[in-house]
């Protein structure tokens, strides 16, 4: 079951017509601060054939750019499907952001066939993510995709931020 309160808060943020970077920062904070098993939350946007980290909360990461097909995030884009990994040690091409990470979920930010990026969440607990997490993140990703679609139609100047850590 989708967390309706968090979803309504995300809808409210999108309706505020905030600058894109501020919207992404607030969505990351909303998820990280309200879901205690979400130890690291980030949003990567797709640029050419690379995912570029825009905003995140959690420990700093060196993975600011991820090629499509590499790691869990890049695999999600290459396979055009969400990824739920219960044990990251079992993933051959896993990109470790933290030695404490045990599980990961990556949900595509997409509008039909167009992929704009991913919401990436790590947990220090094994098997931390399930259908409820995927449903919530899918709903939020849909809201973001709609905003990104409008943003791209109004301007082709969508540029990555400096991958700021949200505080």
Image (cartoon, rainbow, N blue to C red):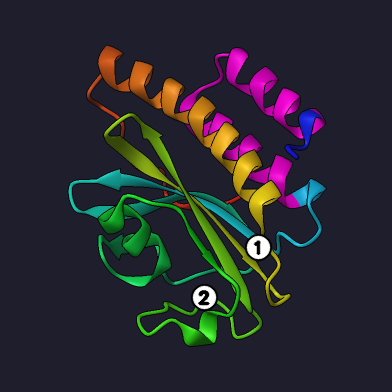
Front-most of 126 and 60?
126
Q: Point out residue 63 in the picture as x, y percentages from the top left corner.
A: 41, 68
Query: In this image, 43 relative to 167: left or right?
Result: left
Res 85 visible? yes
Q: Which mark is residue 97?
A: 2
Query: In this image, 133 relative to 97: left or right?
Result: right
Please name the residue shown 55% across and 39% down the image.
138
Dot 2 lies on which element?
A: loop
**Quarter holding the N terminus?**
top right
Q: Which mark is residue 58?
A: 1
Dot 1 lies on which element?
A: loop
Please name the residue shown 26% across and 57% down the image.
78
Please name the residue shown 70% across and 47% down the image.
132
Q: Is residue 150 above or below residue 57?
A: above
Read off the magenta span: 5-32
Q: Point out residue 150 in the picture as x, y percentages from the top left corner.
A: 36, 16
Q: Taken as a whole, is the magenta stretch helix, strand or loop?
A: helix
Q: Is residue 21 above or below residue 123?
A: above
């Amino acid at each position: 079951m989708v967390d309706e309160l968090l979803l309504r808060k995300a809808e409210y943020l999108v309706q505020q017509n905030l600058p894109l970077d501020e919207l992404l920062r607030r969505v990351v904070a909303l998820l990280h601060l309200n879901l205690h098993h979400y130890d690291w939350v980030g949003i990567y946007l797709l640029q050419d054939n690379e995912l570029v980290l825009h905003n995140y909360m959690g420990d700093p990461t060196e993975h600011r750019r991820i090629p499509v097909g590499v790691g869990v995030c890049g695999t999600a884009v290459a396979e055009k499907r969400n990824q739920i990994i219960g044990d990251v040690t079992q993933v051959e091409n896993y990109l470790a952001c933290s030695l404490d990470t045990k599980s990961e979920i990556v949900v595509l930010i997409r509008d039909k066939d167009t992929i704009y990026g991913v919401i990436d969440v790590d947990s220090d607990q094994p098997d931390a993510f399930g259908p409820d997490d995927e449903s919530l993140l899918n709903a939020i990703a849909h809201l973001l995709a709609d905003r990104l679609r409008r943003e791209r139609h109004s301007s082709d100047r969508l540029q990555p931020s400096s991958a700021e850590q949200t505080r």
